[in-house]
Amino acid sequence: MRPSPADLVREFHLACGLDARTVPTRVTPELAAHRGRLLAEEAAEAAEVSVAGPLDRLAHELADVVYVAYGTALVHGIDLDAVIAEIHRSNMTKRGPDGRVARREDGKVLKGEHYQAPDVSGVLRGQGWEG
């Protein structure tokens, strides 16, 4: 079984002396801004390659986005796997009782009448967040 992205990124952060919190925590504005810049940089690279780049480069850039996103979650003490599971649960409620979904013209799946918003705050409280 492969280690999860969260485990791999935690290993990197600990090996390099980077922040790795275990409880959801506010960080300094400087650290938050730094992580935001890293995310924006990686997302921009992935977006650029997604249009005209080769598939192997796209895979690399997408993995970099995920890696930095997991690192940002780790810096903030967020168990991102649990948050993703809650987002997935919510997304699955976009389907109607018949299993069908409504789509926007460009194919994006829309929220239907049975949609249930994710309870990310509840997930974070379960991780020890007091917000």
Image (cartoon, rainbow, N blue to C red):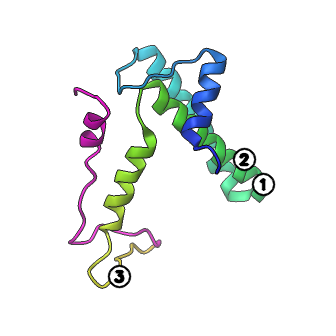
- Circle 1/circle 3 CB separation < 8 Å: no
- Circle 2/circle 1 CB separation < 8 Å: yes
Helix, strand or loop at mark 3: loop
Q: Which mark is residue 56?
A: 1
Front residue of this view, candidates 34 and 82: 82
Q: Gap in Å between the C-alphas at discs 3 and 2?
A: 33 Å
Where residue 41 sits: x, y (%)? 61, 34
Q: Amino acid at mark 2?
A: His
Residue at the bottom extreme, as displayed = 98
Q: Which mark is residue 18?
A: none
Asked whether 118 falls inside the magenta stretch, the response is: yes
Helix, strand or loop at mark 2: helix
Mark 2 is surrounded, within 10 Å at the Cα level, by few (under 14), some (14 to 19) or many (20 or more) other residues, namely: few
Where residue 65 sits: x, y (%)? 59, 42
Q: Amino acid at mark 3?
A: Arg
Q: Is residue 41 above or below residue 107?
A: above
> Left or right: 38 with respect to 121?
right
Q: Which residues are magenta?
A: 106-131
Residue 45 appears in which quarter of the rendering?
top right
Main secondary structure found in the magenta portion: loop
Q: Gap in Å between the C-alphas at discs 2 and 1?
A: 6 Å
Quadrant location, the C terminus: top left
Q: Which residue is mark 2?
A: 60
Q: Which residue is mark 3?
A: 100
Helix, strand or loop at mark 1: helix
Front residue of this view, candidates 80 and 60: 80
